[in-house]
Image (cartoon, grey):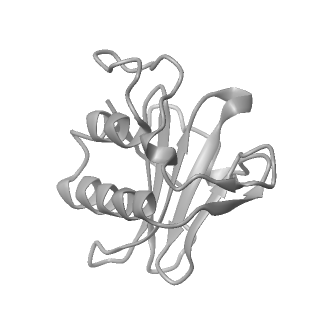
């Protein structure tokens, strides 16, 4: 189950950065002061197999972490994954279902907003990966002691 990491570094703009984490997912969100999600990055997988789906309001979808330049199949969120690290999750559970399970205690607006965008991603054409490895900003790499 995802929990919020508190004490995330902010950049001084009107956009609030938030980080939610569990053993399989890292969800980074950018929200306006009215709570609108303007971007998010959903990282999944572990270590060298980590991938990220990123959505930005004005730019659409990107994928990082694919090792080839081939387009990512549009049904990636429905594909079967390796055995899950989430207690109670089915080993053949697709990413979308795993996210729904892991995100059940997130704030409603974030859970529903990200889930809606993930469903949109499933329906679109393939997305070409930008990079072979997921890159994280400094604020996305450090958990401040006592923050979560």
| Residue depicted at 28% across the width and 41% down the height | 100
Classify residue 59 by image quadrant.
bottom right
Question: Relative to residue 9, is residue 129 drawn left or right?
Answer: right
List x then y, in percent, for residue 79: 48, 37
> Where is the C terminus found, in terms of image quarters?
top left
Classify residue 116 by image quadrant.
bottom left
| Residue depicted at 39% across the width and 57% down the height | 118
Classify residue 53 by image quadrant.
bottom right
List x then y, in percent, for residue 109: 22, 61
Height in image: 115 above or below 145? below
* Viewer-proximal residue among 98 and 36: 98
| Residue depicted at 54% across the width and 66% down the height | 125
List x then y, in percent, for residue 96: 37, 43
Height in image: 6 above or below 74? above
Considering every residue shown, the one lying at the far left of the view is 108
Height in image: 37 above or below 136? below
* Viewer-proximal residue among 38 and 68: 68
* Viewer-proximal residue among 83 and 136: 83
Considering every residue shown, the one lying at the far bottom of the view is 58
């Amino acid at each position: 189950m995802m929990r919020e990491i508190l004490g995330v570094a902010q950049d001084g703009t009107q956009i609030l950065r938030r980080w939610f984490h569990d053993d399989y997912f890292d969800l980074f969100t950018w929200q306006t002061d009215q709570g609108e999600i303007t971007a998010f990055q959903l990282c999944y997988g572990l270590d060298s197999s980590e991938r990220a789906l990123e959505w930005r309001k004005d730019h659409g979808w990107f994928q990082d972490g694919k090792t080839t330049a081939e387009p990512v199949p549009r049904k990636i969120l429905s594909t079967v994954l390796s055995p899950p690290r989430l207690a109670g999750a089915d080993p053949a559970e697709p990413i979308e279902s795993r996210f729904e399970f892991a995100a059940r205690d997130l704030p409603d607006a974030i859970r529903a907003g990200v889930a809606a965008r993930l469903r949109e991603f499933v329906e679109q054409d393939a997305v070409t990966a930008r990079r072979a490895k997921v890159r994280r900003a400094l604020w996305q790499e450090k958990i401040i002691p006592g923050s979560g």
